[in-house]
Every structure is written in C-alpha cells, then in structure tokens.
Image (cartoon, grey):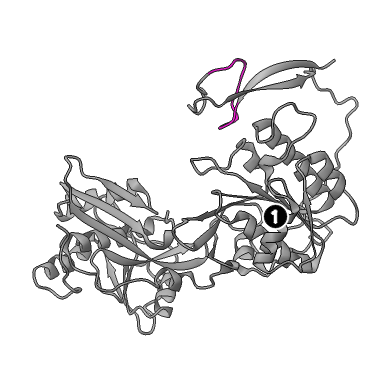
Amino acid sequence: MAKRTSQYICQACGAVSAKWAGKCEACGEWNSMVEEVVESAAPKGITPRGGRRVDLVGLAGQDTPPARRVSGLAEIDRVLGGGLVPGSAVLIGGDPGIGKSTLLLQVVARLSNGGGCAYISGEEAVDQVRMRAARLGVSAAPVALAASTNVRDILATLDAPDGPSVVVIDSIQTMYVDNLDSAPGTVAQVRASAQELIRLAKKRGIALLLVGHVTKEGTIAGPRVLEHMVDTVLYFEGDRGHQFRILRGVKNRFGPTDEIGVFEMTEGGLMEVPNPSALFLADRRDDVSGAVVFAGMEGTRPVLVEIQALVAPSPFGTPRRAVIGWDTGRLAMVTAVLEARCGLDFAGRDVFLNVAGGLKISEPAADLAVAAALISSLTGVAAPADTVVFGEIGLSAEVRAVGQSESRLKEAAKLGFTRAILPARRRGAGGGLAGLTVEEIGQVGDLAAPFLAAGEGGVVGRRVAKPG
C-alpha cells in the first residue's frame, strides 16, 4: 500500500527537504519552501521479472525521418534549425508582456495552412485569444482554440489519430495534473504536466510548443529539469523601451544553439527583421565621441551594432561602472588593460557602457570595440564613422584573432563601411574586400595611439567636447 508523506520543495530551484525552513539551503531563496504531499510505494529492489523487453535497433535506420514543419517565418525557422521537428517539444520563455503569446499565435496561424494546429490557453478565455487574432489579422486561419488547464482533459482531446500536428500550450505553469495535491505552478505540477504532454507529443508525433514564465532573475520558472525534458529551449528577449525583440536559442537537439531571430514589435504584431544590422544602426550619429561600430556574430549571422561608452568625472569616492548589454567583468578587464598597458587614466571617473538597440553581446570579440569606445570618450575624439572594429584583448594588451572574420567584413562592406580594424588574421586568411580597407593591429596601443594623437591636434575623427 502506498504511503502518504509530506515533503517541502523549493519553488525556485526544486530542492527537496524533509522539514520546512525559511531559507532554501540549496539556492538561498527566502520563503520558497512549499509543502507537498507525495505517495511513495518504495520497492526494495527492481528485478527483471515482469518487465517488458525493449527492442534494440541500429544507428542507421531504414525509415526516412519526417520532414520539418516550416512556418514561413524565416527568423523562427532559422533559430529552430530549419523548422519544427514532428514529435519535438519546444519551450519558449520570456518576460511578461514581451510578446510570447503574440509570436506563437502568429506562428501557429502560419502553420495551420499545412495541417491541423491547436492553441490551448490556460491564462485567457477563447474570446480574448480571438481578440488578439483579430488585431494580428489572422482570424481566418484554421486554428482550433481551447481554454483549459486540466492536463487529463487536454490529453483526451489531443490523443486521437486525426488530432492536430502542432499544439501550443500557453502556459505550462497554469497546467495541473488532478492526481497531485499541489497547486498549479509548483515544481511537482510543472514537472508532471510537462512529462505527460511531452509523452503524448512523442507518441503521436506532435510538435509541442510550451510557453514558460520566467523568474525575476530571468530564468524559466519551475524545476530546472523542465529544460532538460524538452528538445529546444528558446528565450524571447527585449527591452520594453525598444521595439526590437530577439528570439535566442540556448538549447536545440535538432539544430544550432547560438542562432538568433530579430523581430520588430508593431501595432499589427511582430514583424521579421531580415537585416538587423541596418536597423540597429539606423539612429547612429557620426559626430559623437565614445561611439564605435562592432562587427559581431550571432550564430551564423553577422550583426553590426553600435557600442556606446561615456567616461565622466565621478562625484563619488568610488567611481561607478555601469554596463547594459555586455559583461561587467570584461569591462573591468578592458579598463585595467588600458590603464596598466596603455597609460590611460580611468581613476576618479565613472564609466558607462551601452549596446545600442537592446542587443546583448557575449562574445570576447567585442573587447577591441569596447576599448575603442572608451578611448574615444576619454579623449573626446569621435571615431571615424566609416570604421568597424572587432577583436579580443589579452591581459598583456595583445589583440587576439577571432573566428569568422570574413563574414564580419562582408557584412560591413555591404552596409557601406570602408575601413575595418581587426587582429592580425591567421596565415591563409583572405584579404580585404572591394572598397574596404583592412587594418590589422597586434597591440591595444596601436588602437589608442591615433586617438591620443588626435586629442593633441590629429585628425582621426572629429574633435568634440569632453564630458566634464
């Protein structure tokens, strides 16, 4: 007979404790331990008797794998690796109001033209979903709608030979399994609900799209095991102050994990941005010190973005270091290298760094562009408007080579840039492109020298007033 016991589970990290505590010992979160009743019939051991034999097959199968479902939205299909794989589970997380439901409603409306699609909402009524569809102009799409949170009812609806091939669950935190006593959104409910829905998706070949809430730290709420259970994890990022939205893949069993899709939020929904570089540089000014164009890579796509720096006298004893869109630790390293190796003085000065457009950059290739922006702001000399910069900086002030230089240079040439500052490329790398002058440097001092000379009357860029 099953024995009913109580245990306390942290709603932030999923840690289990036998007794309640005000603070989770695993993650340090306060007031996150919730009591849940579980039934355990702990067997003393597992024996082969009564088990069903599992068929073992070879790696080279005879059957042709099913074709991907292409949505027609190039940005979505790129992040997914070419489209939705039948029988896969995709988890999409993002901040409240960022546009997750809007994006998935547009996607499922496109996919419904090629097969049955269902949109099941646990947060809104059917009429509310219809109102959004009318605003997006997709009311005529043959999408089946439902408003339900009971996983047992949803499984009974979908588990049919003529059931839909694409299903959206909005959101997984609102679903519940009725044989558990815990409330919807708890660790046990999220784990059990996702497990049942994914099991059905694998059985019927359904492409399952799950919407996930995020915590205040930006991670998907619920147990961490949820991200391990699904095949693909996507994060929908963006700043409400900008109209740009970025769909970033962080896990993908059927494609690359470093691709991004760029969208623009409009009154008619999310619109694709086929050339994000031109969009990120649309509001750029040429006569401002501290602004440098960085040629970066997001997956296989080159993206040009403006990096802005402001170095100003600090009224406080401890200068501030504020960063938006980049790593604070790397900013500290770059400023330390500029001080120790190049003789520049950032002591007593506040340093602010911003990646324009709301894009978040993580690759070390941005080091050289950040250094150029800091030097430009410190000297008050604007960087040349027709120049792009990229490269990694070492602690001894050497400039290290980065990958995919040719793709970065081609994107810069396509947008009309005529000069590029980059590390010395490896032997055998291609030369410059038509109309693009390539300047290879080996030390950060080679980058700083023209700015310092221009501050004394040189002509690197237009001289502007230094802050303070």
Q: Which residues are magenta?
A: 10-21
Identify the secondary structure beneath mark 1: helix
User: In the drawing, does residue 15 fall left or right of residue 452?
Assistant: right
Q: Residue at x 84, y 59 (%)?
A: 63
Where does the N terminus fall, quadrant-wise? top right
Q: Provide the major secondary structure of the magenta segment.
A: loop
The reply to whether residue 324 is visible in this rendering is: yes
Pick the residue in front: 140 or 292.
140
Q: In the image, is residue 119 above or below residue 148?
A: below
Where is residue 38? Give x, y as percent: 73, 22
The quarter holding residue 60 reads: bottom right
Image height of 303 relative to 21, above or below: below
The residue under label 1 is 128
Q: Would residue 331 be found to the left or right of residue 51 on screen?
A: left
Quarter residue 370 falls in: bottom left
Quadrant housing the C terminus? bottom left
Residue drawn at 74 percent across, 38 percent down = 193
Relative to 309, is 324 on the left or the right? right
- State yes or no: residue 141 in magenta: no
Furthest residue in direction bottom, as rendered: 434
